[in-house]
Amino acid sequence: MFLICSAVKPRNSSYFSAFFDKFVSLISERSTSANIASTENLIFNSTVFGFSVRSKIEGDISCAFRVSVFIQKEMTTIKNNLLVLFKLKFSILIICFGFFVSKGLPSISHEMWLDTTTFRQSVGKDIQISLKNGQMFKGIGLSYFKSRFSNFYYISNKQKIEIESRMGDTPAATISTGKNGLVTGIYISKKSTITYKSMDKFANFVSEKGEDWAIQKHAELKFPNNNFKEEYYRFSKILIGVGDASGSDTNVGLKHELVALTNPYLISSSDEFSVQLLFNNEPQKNRQITIFERDFENKVSILTTLTDSNGIGKFEVTEGHDYLVDNVILELNDNPKNNVFWTSYWAALTFSASNESH
């Protein structure tokens, strides 16, 4: 018997060492004469596992067959074990990455919103909902971590359904409903804290969100301009049209909430879209609402409007475009502790303007 075996074995792999030892041992177990006039070529190459084996056995066909069967069984076991190990390690990596990214993002990003690639969906089909954090209606998808939110659910046909995903899932949720109607997804974060290293970043933030009064108040109260803190909460909603998309958004009682007074999936091209801004269930007048509009090419434009005496803001929409409506309310902490002088509440509402039924 003539055997050629070349291999590059992974380091610290007792399993592969055992495999090669057993393989060579099996090759040596020739039970019959080598006078049988036949040659069996057994070729096995695997770049996936980092080694290659090539053997030429002259003589006993049964020996070659036994080797072939052994290799197939052993490599199936190796493949399955490595796939399980790879999936496990990859899942752990994604979970850890998502956790640390989600922990760090609030200090460098602005809006948090719920997003989807299927604002219109057929009855019974899956809808993936992403939790996004970023700027200009562009951001990364955050993973599902129960420790990061106080509530995550959706409402379909007046029924509240809690969203339960696996830790680390991205997108954060996959839902489906067996009935026509407007579906409202709701995400309420837990409290988070940001530290401002300088006054400039805080001033830029409050000016962008229409809360300029905080700059002067901060100075009047002689708060520090460095290393001061703000606590914040997120209240995000998304509207998804299932089937005929009938129905309407409602006030679900969030501390800070944007309520759509128009169904974006039943809107005509001549209609304006209306939202009402509520804080502690009270309409908020003369408040800035920021509207991010995303077109077919993912280009984003921004416009702002002020709410009227009933807390209602109106703006035009374009068929097929996606929208993120955003508002921030900033409050002064009466009894600041640990340099936490401010608390902000963020309301977000996302939808697409589309009257095409599914």
Image (spheres, rainbow, N blue to C red):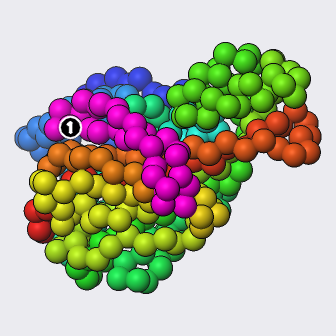
Q: Is residue 76 visible?
A: no
Q: Quadrant of the N terminus?
A: top left
Marks counted in the figure total: 1
Inspect the magenta stretch and tell me whether residue 298 lies in it.
yes
In the image, the segment drawn in magenta is 283-311
Give the structural element (helix, strand or loop) at label 1.
loop
Quadrant in which residue 118 is drawn: bottom left
Q: Is residue 358 above or below residue 342?
A: below
Q: Which residue is mark 1?
A: 295
User: How far from the left and from the top, in percent, is residue 328?
Assistant: 57, 43
**Residue ID at (39%, 31%):** 136
Q: Residue furthest left?
A: 37
What kind of residue is marked 1? Answer: Asp
**Residue ID at (22%, 72%):** 245
User: How far from the left and from the top, in percent, is residue 5?
Assistant: 33, 26
245 left or right of 128 in image: left
Q: Is residue 303 visible?
A: yes
